[in-house]
Image (cartoon, rainbow, N blue to C red):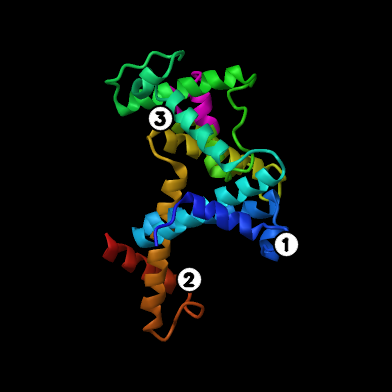
C-alpha cells in the first residue's frame, strides 16, 4: 500500500495523542529525542558507507521520522508545523541558488550566471550564506557554528568559516609548519603537565587544517583510517588464532609481526 508524508504525520499525531497515544512517545521532549536523531544520522552514514541501499531506505525513513517527531511536539506547543519546516528549506534552497531560480526571485544580492560550475556555485552559496548571517545581526563569521557538533567536524567548520574572510594559510605548507611547531610544543610539555591537553588539542586542530587544505574532510579521512585499522586488527586476530598464542596471550612482538604481515598482504 502506497504511503505518503500525510500518513506519517497522522501516525505521529496518534502516537502523541493525549488519550489514545503511546506512553513512551507522549513522554518525549526535544531534549530526550536529540540523542536518537544523532544516532539515526550516523546510521544513515553507515548504510551509505556499506553501500547497503535497502538499509539506507529504512534509515532515511527513521531520520525523517525524527523531523516529524520534532514538528509534532512543536505543533503541540504552538511553535511551528511540519509544513513550516518544508517551506523554510524550500525558501532557503531557492534563495541560495539564484543561478537556477533567478526567474522566481525579485531580489538577490549576488549575481549568479546560469553557467557556473560546481565550485563557483559553492562559493556563491557561501557568499549568500554570509550575507544572511550579517542580515540576522550575527557579529562574527563564527556565529551559529553549533557547539554540539563533534569536535573534529567543528574544527573543520571553524577553519572553513575563517577562510571565507581570508584568515587562512596561503598554501598547505604553512599548515605543515604549524603542525611541526605544535609537535615540538607537545614534546616539550611534561606528561604530567595540565598544559599537555591544550598542546595536544592544538596539534589536532593543526592537523585538521592540513586535511582541509588538501580538499578533504577530516571526519571522512579518520573514518577511513578507523576502517583500515579495524580490518587489519581483525586479520591479526584471525592469524594469531591459528597459533598457540592468540590475541590476549601473544606478546607485543608477536602481534607486531602479525600486523606487519597483514599490512604487506593488504597492499
**Magenta region includes residue 161:** yes
Q: Is residue 190 visible in the rendered structure shown here?
A: no
Q: Quadrant of residue 10?
A: bottom right
Compare residues 148 and 241 and report the one nearer the observer: 148
Separation of marks 2 and 1 at Cα, in angstroms: 62 Å
> Which x, y percent locates residue 43?
48, 57
Residue positioned 72% across, 43% down in the render: 77
Compare residues 113 and 175 and report the one nearer the observer: 113
Q: Is residue 101 visible in the rendered structure shown here?
A: yes
> Contact, CB < 8 Å: mark 2 with mark 3?
no
What secondary structure is marked by label 2? helix
**Magenta region includes residue 242:** no
Task: Give the number of the disc on residue 236.
Answer: none
Badge nearest the viewer, 2 or 3: 3
Task: Give the number of the disc on residue 252.
Answer: 2
Q: Quadrant of residue 65?
A: bottom right
> Contact, CB < 8 Å: mark 2 with mark 1?
no
Residue at the bottom extreme? 244
From the image, tell me which residue sits under label 1.
19
Badge nearest the viewer, 2 or 1: 1
Residue positioned 39% across, 27% down in the render: 122
Q: What range is drawn magenta here?
A: 158-174
Mark 2 or mark 1: whose residue is earlier in sequence: 1
Mark 2 or mark 3: whose residue is earlier in sequence: 3
Compare residues 217 and 237 and report the one nearer the observer: 217
> Which x, y percent locates residue 93?
44, 30
From the image, tell me which residue sits under label 3.
172
Question: In this rendering, would 33 be left or right of 115?
Answer: right
> Contact, CB < 8 Å: mark 1 with mark 3?
no
Question: In this rendering, would 139 be left or right of 167?
Answer: right
Amino acid at each position: 500500500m502506497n504511503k505518503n508524508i500525510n500518513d506519517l504525520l497522522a501516525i505521529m499525531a496518534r502516537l502523541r495523542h493525549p488519550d489514545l497515544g503511546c506512553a513512551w512517545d507522549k513522554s518525549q521532549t526535544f531534549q530526550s529525542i536529540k540523542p536518537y536523531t544523532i544516532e539515526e544520522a550516523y546510521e544513515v552514514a553507515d548504510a551509505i558507507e556499506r553501500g547497503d541501499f535497502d538499509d539506507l531506505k529504512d534509515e532515511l525513513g527513521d531520520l525523517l521520522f525524527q523531523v516529524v517527531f520534532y514538528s509534532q511536539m512543536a505543533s503541540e506547543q504552538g511553535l511551528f508545523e511540519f509544513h513550516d519546516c518544508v517551506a523554510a528549506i524550500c525558501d532557503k534552497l531557492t534563495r541560495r541558488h539564484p543561478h537556477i531560480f533567478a526567474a522566481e526571485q525579485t531580489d538577490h544580492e549576488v549575481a549568479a550566471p546560469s553557467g557556473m560550475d560546481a565550485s563557483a556555485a559553492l562559493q556563491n552559496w557561501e557568499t549568500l550564506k554570509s550575507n544572511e548571517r550579517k542580515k540576522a545581526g550575527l557579529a562574527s563569521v563564527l556565529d551559529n557554528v553549533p557547539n554540539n557538533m563533534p569536535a573534529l567536524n567543528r574544527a573543520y567548520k571553524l577553519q572553513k568559516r575563517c577562510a571565507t574572510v581570508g584568515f587562512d594559510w596561503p598554501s598547505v605548507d604553512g599548515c605543515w609548519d604549524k603542525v611541526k611547531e605544535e609537535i615540538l610544543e607537545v614534546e616539550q610539555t611534561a606528561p604530567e603537565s595540565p598544559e599537555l591537553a591544550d598542546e595536544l588539542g592544538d596539534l589536532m586542530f593543526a592537523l585538521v587544517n592540513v586535511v582541509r587544505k588538501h580538499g578533504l574532510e577530516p571526519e571522512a579521512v579518520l573514518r577511513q583510517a578507523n576502517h583500515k585499522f579495524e580490518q587489519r586488527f581483525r586479520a591479526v586476530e584471525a592469524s594469531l588464532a591459528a597459533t598457540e598464542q592468540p590475541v590476549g596471550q601473544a606478546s607485543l612482538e608477536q602481534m607486531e609481526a602479525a600486523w606487519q604481515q597483514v599490512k604487506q598482504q593488504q597492499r
